[in-house]
Image (cartoon, rainbow, N blue to C red):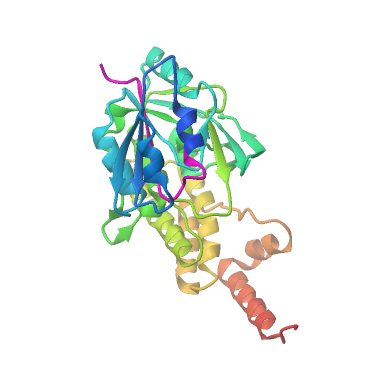
Amino acid sequence: MNPDVSVIIPSRNRLWSLPQSVASCRSTRISVEIIVVDDASTDGTAGWLKSQNDVVTISGEGWGKPWAVAKALSVAKGTFVRFLDSDDWLTPGANEEQFAIGERGNADLVVSGYHLYRDQTLIQTFPWEPTDDFVARQLGEDPTKGSHYSAFLFRRSFVQDIPHRTHFPAADFASRDDRCFVLEVALRKPVIAVHAEPALCHRHHDRDRLQFASGLRSVGTNIQHLLIYRQILSMLNRAGELTPRRRHAAANALWPLATWIGYSHAREAAEVSDWIYELDPKFVPPVPGLLGILYRKLGFRRTQRLLRYRRAAINSLPKRR
């Protein structure tokens, strides 16, 4: 008999947090299959996993999260599946409650909110906010009302052939595979059921996450985000489903990328800005104060030029010892 829920946990050097993640998945009320992909850890994770008799362990060679998730999904047997980062953990009863809701509503996707933690300290709670356009929500209509995909339970048969993409042509998306995955799920128009209470405890910390990184690798993350939006919006446009509301949602998400690119690549940043206003001609930059006034009055190019002059002037000042 197949398990009710499979939980897939990719992990690399997360022995400091993995036991809490695994423990939060266990259940005495439903059958839960816990699959951990140890992606070439060097911190003793492999030894700890050998002592966990109820955990299915897959050994990786350091190919990263998309590979790990794809490998685990190929062996998962649960009616539903969840993708849980080894930094995070589930709230008590989340698997059981979401499974019951999903079965009762014959849902393809059971959504939920999440708690945000700084290490072990609760910072804020983000409940799931109702929406009548799941695609717009996932595109970024209102970041304060979004959720985290680890808080979602997916019917395995519905997502079995949706990969955590490592690449599209000429673009490596490994750092934003979860965002691309959820957007592709949304495009398939899933039957959605809602779990009222937050299902996930999402942890912020100062260490690199498996799918995110600091320094130079963070540059790739932002570029990948931009390329994902080009692909998804193109798919929506071809299907005649790129509504004004979805255009506006995408513009909201693309604006931070345009300003970030502007730090080093003025022409490319201006191209993203042009794209934003093509999507939403009435777009208003969500920037407060004087800087917001400059963007609205002078436009993106001139404002970015002023910012570059300002940075150059500051960098030319003598350094204090």
Does 9 lie within the magenta span?
A: yes
Q: Indicate the position of residue 304 as horizontal and vertical percent values.
A: 59, 71
Does 282 lie within the magenta span?
A: no
Vertical comparison of 157 with 68: above or below: above
Answer with the quarter of the image where residue 275 lies: bottom left
Q: Nearer the viewer, residue 279 or 93?
A: 93
Q: Nearer the viewer, residue 199 or 302?
A: 199
Residue 177 visible, this angle: yes
- Is residue 259 toward the left or the right of residue 100 in the image? right
- Is residue 177 toward the left or the right of residue 314 in the image? left
Answer with the quarter of the image where residue 169 lies: bottom left
Q: Residue at x 24, y 36 (%)?
A: 74
Q: Residue at x 50, y 23 (%)?
A: 94
Residue segment shown in magenta: 1-18
Residue 241 visible, this angle: no
Label count reads 0
Q: Indicate the position of residue 180 as horizontal and vertical percent values.
A: 38, 46
Q: Residue at x 46, y 47 (%)?
A: 14
Vertical comparison of 316 with 204: above or below: below
Q: Nearer the viewer, residue 130 or 132?
A: 130
Q: Indicate the position of residue 261 as horizontal and vertical percent values.
A: 50, 66
Q: Indicate the position of residue 147 as horizontal and vertical percent values.
A: 52, 36
Q: Nearer the viewer, residue 74 or 171?
A: 74
Q: Residue at x 25, y 16 (%)?
A: 1
